[in-house]
Image (tube, rainbow, N blue to C red):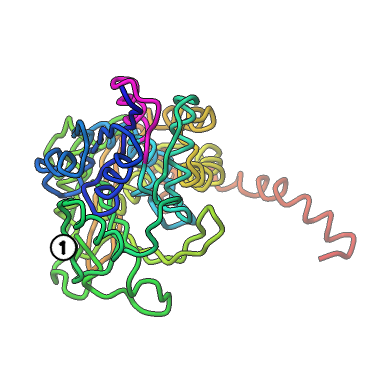
């Protein structure tokens, strides 16, 4: 038996050329393709991989595992990298890496491989995840070391070796899609001054062309898990995400355009579409604020969303830190049961109603009507004690 490598395979030009390139280097190549809800027909993947030189080709539907074990914890953390990016592509990398390790053990391979470049984030996410799970496996990244310097050279190589790849010059974008959203870069997007062309977007409609009437949505949560959409119950979280995406994408919801700080120090202009996260994040945050006490809610907002997002972005999924943060958000999630009503209109999502059996809202404390049960006289003593430090400071003549 020769050297065996399990390759994360998409079926595109890069990974198809990688199959042959590794074969030429003396490897037996086994490809692994994860169905993450990328909206593509994957039935032809094994045939394409073997035509490129693979000895085996594995395709696996991991949509529900991705939704429940990766998207859901990130939702519970309300994680947004640099306050905007809901980690659509970043989340899939540790799952793919875990599957590569599993396949490597199954096929007795000492190597795994990926198609990431040397200046992207994914090389870090793949390799750190693999080493955390299987430190003795060697990771190969052909794009970082092979001889090709331009896409045209790869096309020529593919044609020379009879590798079946479709090369389109119509859309110059690099697209990465899964059920959580779409990542879009390259082409005209590389000029951060230019507005993204409409043809860059894959799944959302322009807010300018969205329906004139708003869409109302009701989401039900049970212990931090979305379980119903507009009265329809779901046992499969991936299906709820897919249905929610189809429902709100025509309203232009979830478009994100940012200049992002990559791990390797490069600033990169990135465009994302994340319709389902846009709605779910708004709903979850609002319900969380309804059921948590002020001390816990403020601690959560201060310490969790940004740090969790950074952890995922930087490839640190398989760490005790992530497990500990998940334990914290899982405890909070036990209180997140109830319903949220949202209005979707022309690219915007707005919570317009919420209720929960564990709500900490009390009308008789909040109201200014005759039902008011709050002791207003206590306010005098509260402000006296709360403002004491400033009063003392004022006595010193400082301001």
Residue 75: quarter of image: top left
Specify whether residue 325 is painted magenta: no
Q: How many labels, in total?
A: 1
| Residue 323 x/y as whole percent | 48, 28
Residue occupying the point 20% across, 63% down: 204
Residue occupying the point 16% across, 49% down: 39
The residue indicated by pointer 1 is 250
258 vs 393, nearest the viewer: 258
Quadrant for the N terminus in the image: top left
Task: Say above or below: 124 vs 336.
Answer: below
| Residue 268 x/y as whole percent | 46, 64
Q: Disc 1 on helix, strand or loop?
A: helix
Residue occupying the point 37% across, 58% down: 148
348 vs 121, nearest the viewer: 121
Quadrant for the C terminus in the image: bottom right
Residue 93: quarter of image: top left
Query: What stretch of residues is rendered in magenta?
Result: 97-113
Residue 235 seen: yes
- 292 left or right of 229 in image: right
Specify whether residue 109 is painted magenta: yes
Task: Say above or below: 106 vs 48.
Answer: above
| Residue 339 x/y as whole percent | 25, 41
Task: Say above or below: 25 vs 275.
Answer: above
128 vs 232, nearest the viewer: 128
- 390 left or right of 204 in image: right
Task: Say above or below: 309 vs 250.
Answer: above
Residue 374 seen: no
Callout 1 environment at 10 Å: few (<14), some (14 to 19), or many (20+)? many
| Residue 352 x/y as whole percent | 28, 55
Residue occupying the point 32% across, 71% down: 187
């Amino acid at each position: 038996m020769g050297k065996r490598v399990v390759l994360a395979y998409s079926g595109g030009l890069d990974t198809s050329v990688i199959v042959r390139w590794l074969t030429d280097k003396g490897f037996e190549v086994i490809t692994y393709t994860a169905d993450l809800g990328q909206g593509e027909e994957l039935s032809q993947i094994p045939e394409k991989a073997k035509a490129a030189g693979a000895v085996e080709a594995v395709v696996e539907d991991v949509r529900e595992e991705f939704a429940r074990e990766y998207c859901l914890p990130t939702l519970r953390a309300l994680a947004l990298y640099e306050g905007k990016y809901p980690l659509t592509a970043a989340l899939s990398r540790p799952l793919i890496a875990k599957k590569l390790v599993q396949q490597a053990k199954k096929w007795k391979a000492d190597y795994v491989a990926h198609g990431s470049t040397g200046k992207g984030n994914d090389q870090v996410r793949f390799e750190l995840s693999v080493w955390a799970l299987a430190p003795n496996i060697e990771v190969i990244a052909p794009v970082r070391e092979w001889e090709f310097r331009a896409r045209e050279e790869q096309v020529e190589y593919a044609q020379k070796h009879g590798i079946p790849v479709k090369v389109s010059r119509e859309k110059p974008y690099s697209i990465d899609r899964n059920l959580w959203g779409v990542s879009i870069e390259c082409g005209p997007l590389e000029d951060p001054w230019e507005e993204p062309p409409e043809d860059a977007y894959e799944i959302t409609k322009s807010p300018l062309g969205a329906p004139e009437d708003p869409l109302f949505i009701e989401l039900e949560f049970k212990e931090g898990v979305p379980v119903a959409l507009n009265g329809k119950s779901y046992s499969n979280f991936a299906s709820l995400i897919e249905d929610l995406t189809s429902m709100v994408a025509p309203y232009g919801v979830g478009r994100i355009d940012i200049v992002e700080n990559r791990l390797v120090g490069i600033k990169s202009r990135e465009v994302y579409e994340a319709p389902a996260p846009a709605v779910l994040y708004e709903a979850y945050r609002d319900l969380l604020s309804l059921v948590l006490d002020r001390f816990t809610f403020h601690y959560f907002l201060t310490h969790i969303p940004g740090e969790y997002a950074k952890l995922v972005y930087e490839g640190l999924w398989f760490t005790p830190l992530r497990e500990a943060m998940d334990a914290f958000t899982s405890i909070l999630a036990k209180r997140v049961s109830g319903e949220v009503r949202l209005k979707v209109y022309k690219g915007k999502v707005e919570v317009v109603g919420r209720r929960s059996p564990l709500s900490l809202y009390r009308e008789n404390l909040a109201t200014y009507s005759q039902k008011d049960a709050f002791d207003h006289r206590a306010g005098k003593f509260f402000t006296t004690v709360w403002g004491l430090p400033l009063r003392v400071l004022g006595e010193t003549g400082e301001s």
